[in-house]
Image (cartoon, rainbow, N blue to C red):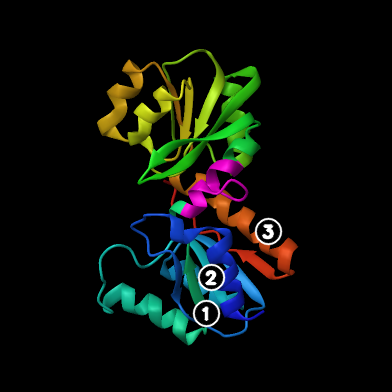
């Protein structure tokens, strides 16, 4: 498949032009003109680049790209990373907030699906776009049972659980990654339980005082879901061979 055709499809399908984002979403490093195999990973780093090239990928799709809201000089680790991609003739495509928000292959849509939420709907506005997914657990679940579903979904034990809400989770919101600061959005949506990735010291007391259950399921773990779902989508739609590059951070 032509790289330009695949990138054009991804740009449109993921609606990257609609998002205000620190990430420079889209194609960040050009790579081969023909793409037969696409690698997927959470983070742009030396390890994922090396493994993508070793797997014979002509394009690597990541959630956290190399290029954000400030220019980086091509020196040190940044130079070595770019060099590895160019030497391996492997392009780099980044999709940050658009992949969090996507209602078919997004991190939060996948998280909601895997833990069994019903009657799901978007919630939580960030930089002008709604990025979270909320829904109902029917019947409500005791927190240990919900945690068990999260472990099954992410293959990772949550980093921490704060149980200051009801004993049974019924109205649950999901925002992957580092969304602990979005508690007011969670409470305004009438949710009793919040699933996110990363803990945050600054909001610890707010979580208690708002009477919420909060499950920190891991930044990395919650953001493997979207790239995996996107890889399955490309396989089904275009017959492209894909590979997932797993470089967990433990965070």
Residue 97: % across, % down: 44, 52
For this rendering, which residue is in front, 139 or 85? 139
Are discs 2 and 1 less than 8 Å apart at CB?
yes
For this rendering, which residue is in front, 142 or 113? 113
Position of 29 relative to 122 (above/below): below
Asked whether residue 93 is in view, the answer is: yes
Q: Residue at x 49, y 62 (%)?
A: 62
Main secondary structure of the magenta stretch: helix
Q: As drawn, is 160 to the left or to the right of 225?
A: left
Q: Which of the two marks, 1 or 3, is nearer to us in this view?
A: 3
Position of 88 relative to 219 (above/below): below
Tag 1 residue = 90
Magenta stretch bounds: 98-110
Q: Residue at x 47, y 86 (%)?
A: 87
Residue 29, image quadrant: bottom left
For this rendering, which residue is in front, 170 or 201? 170
| Real-space Cα separation, disc 2 to disc 1, in angstroms | 7 Å
Number of numbered discs visible in the structure rendering: 3
Tag 2 residue = 60
Q: Residue at x 54, y 51 (%)?
A: 224
Q: Secondary structure at mark 2?
A: strand
Instruction: Say the numbered circle drawn on residue 233.
Output: 3
Residue 222: % across, % down: 51, 44
Residue closest to the far top:
167
Mark 1: few, some, or many residues within 10 Å (few <14, many ≥20)?
Answer: many
| Real-space Cα separation, disc 1 to disc 3, in angstroms | 21 Å
Residue 210: % across, % down: 35, 18
Residue 135, image quadrant: top right
Position of 235 relative to 104 (above/below): below
């Amino acid at each position: 498949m032509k790289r330009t055709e695949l990138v054009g499809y991804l740009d449109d399908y993921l609606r990257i032009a609609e998002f205000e984002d620190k990430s420079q979403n889209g194609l960040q490093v050009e790579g081969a003109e023909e793409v037969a195999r696409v690698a997927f990973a959470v983070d742009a780093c030396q390890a994922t680049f090396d493994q993508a090239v070793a797997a014979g990928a002509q394009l690597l799709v990541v959630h956290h790209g190399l290029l954000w809201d400030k220019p980086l000089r091509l020196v040190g680790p940044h130079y070595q990373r770019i060099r590895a991609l160019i030497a391996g003739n492997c392009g780099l495509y980044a999709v940050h907030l658009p992949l969090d928000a996507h209602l078919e292959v997004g991190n939060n849509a996948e998280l909601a699906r895997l833990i069994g939420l019903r009657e799901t709907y978007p919630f939580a506005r960030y930089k002008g776009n709604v990025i979270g997914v909320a829904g109902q657990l029917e019947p409500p679940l005791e927190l240990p049972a919900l945690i068990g579903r999260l472990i099954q979904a992410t293959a990772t034990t949550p980093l921490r659980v704060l149980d200051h809400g009801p004993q049974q989770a019924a109205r649950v919101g999901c925002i992957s990654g580092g969304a602990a600061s979005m508690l007011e959005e969670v409470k305004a949506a009438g949710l009793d339980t919040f699933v996110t990735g990363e803990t945050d010291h600054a909001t610890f007391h707010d979580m208690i005082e708002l009477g919420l259950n909060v499950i920190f399921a891991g930044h990395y773990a919650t953001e493997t879901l979207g790239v995996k779902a996107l890889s399955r989508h490309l396989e089904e739609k275009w017959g492209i061979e894909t590979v997932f590059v797993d470089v967990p951070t433990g965070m």
